[in-house]
Amino acid sequence: VYAVAMTTIGHFERALGRRALWAPHYAEAPGRTGDMTVKAHYVPRLRIYPHGLRAENAYYSPEKKALLFGYFPATSNEGDVTTPGTTVFSCLSSDIVAHEMSHALLDGLHRRFQEASNPDVPAFHEAFADIVALFQHFTLKELVSFEIGKARGELSAASLLSGIAKQFGEGSGRAGPLREYGGAGMADLDYDKTFEAHDRGSILVFAVYQAFLAIVDRRTDDLIQLATGGSGILPAGTLHPSLVERLTDEVAKTARQMLTMCIRALDYCPSVDISFGEYLRALITADRDAYPDDPLHYRLAFLESFRKWKLLPRDVRTISEETLAWSAPEDPSPSWLKGLLSKIDLGWNQKLKRAEIFALNDKNRYALWKAMHKAFASDPDLYKQFGLLPDLPRYNEDGTVMHAPKKGETTFDIYSVRPTRRVEPDGSFRVEVVAVIQQRIPVAPDGT
């Protein structure tokens, strides 16, 4: 359990360019302005209970900040690898451990993704956790090599790579993996008619996996052409070990890049009310920022797959890589930027303890909040640039007004100030700061 959990954490930290933090505990407390506010308390560690419940289940508990893994007697079918009557321990499934750990890491990054404000929000949580578990299969090169040889290069037929939690699925009577993304098992799911979180999320995973298969085809086409003398049709029999090895290298590399893309996009997602279409926009934008050139058309593969599964954003009239990317500021270096950044402690250090990182984030949130209020007071036009409404009262969770804004001001919160330190394609380091700003506004039942 620990090994898989640490592997998952490592993938997140490398992709995001910073140390991961668990979701804090929240409790009401007097704020700096005297109002009652929700204060975040540091959570030093995530608790893991390998034998947490006697049930056919495993889950991440946002309240306990813990992973609880169940165990149960197998009700598998005759002929399954899992023997009927034996005990299935979900903590022994690397897929389930990676899935639940991804829930915890995602909660630490975007706490409001726990609020089911639209059907995509809970489905995204399930889908993203499956995406991480799925692509972590490809870190096991021996397994990848075995499956490629067995499937004769047809990755879509490599069931051990495309299935999630096979033992758990067989043990619970499903006669196969808990979820299967390689074949036609998801073909009957319709985004417009599917609302259960796991099923709806499976559509997103299937779209991402189909994009992955398309990219693998492009990366390995030259190898297949060389091995077949240009015909593209492999001869009958066992594949040559050298071909299997080269295919394995390409597949593993592509999976590693896809996993990084999917995790890195989290910094480009809206912090509330996410939709699958907005996740696509985050994927496109994050990858364009990191790699302006895309010779193998990774972004096009995502676009085409999301189009096929009807997951494109509904508010974009013309679909292209350029229109799907989030709009950049008209002025990349506005006059107010230097003043805001000067108020933030940018002395981020990977050697800082997580508690120190948490405290520094809290300090920077308040510093940025004060600096923004000062900037808005001197130039009210900045509200529009930040996408904020002026003269807005502070609302409670139930929509009632907590208090009116001070004259000439508005209300908003700085949820986090995140550092990133990533390696550029040329080997240099790129340091950025991602600030998450939230404002609660009244919305009528019709959405106006």
Image (spheres, helix red, strand yellow):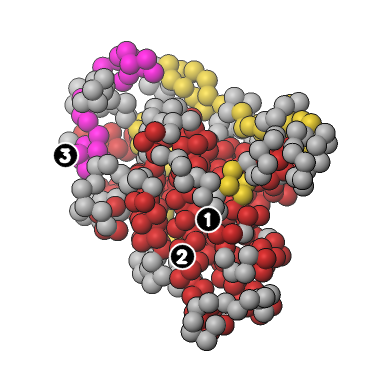
Q: What residue is pinned by disc 1?
A: 259
Q: Residue at x 26, y 20 (%)?
A: 445
Determine the main secondary structure of the stretch shown in magenta: loop
Magenta-span inclusion, residue 395: yes
Direction from residue 197 to residue 353 in the image, left or right: right
Q: Which mark is residue 68?
A: none
Q: What residue is pinned by disc 3?
A: 381
Residue 181 vs 404, above or below: the answer is below
Direction from residue 219 to residue 243 in the image, left or right: right
Residue 53 found in image quarter: top right
Cα gap from disc 2 to disc 3, whole angstroms: 44 Å
Q: Residue at x 77, y 41 (%)?
A: 78
Q: Give the camera-side residue of 429 and 306.
A: 306
Disc 1 is placed on an element classified as helix
Residue 140 vs 197, above or below: the answer is below
Disc 3 is placed on an element classified as loop
x and y percentages locating residue 154 in the rendered image: 57, 65
Nearest-to-viewer mark from 2 and 3: 2
Cα gap from disc 1 to disc 2, whole angstroms: 13 Å
Cα gap from disc 3 to disc 1, whole angstroms: 39 Å
Q: Which residues are magenta?
A: 381-406
Q: What residue is pinned by disc 2?
A: 215
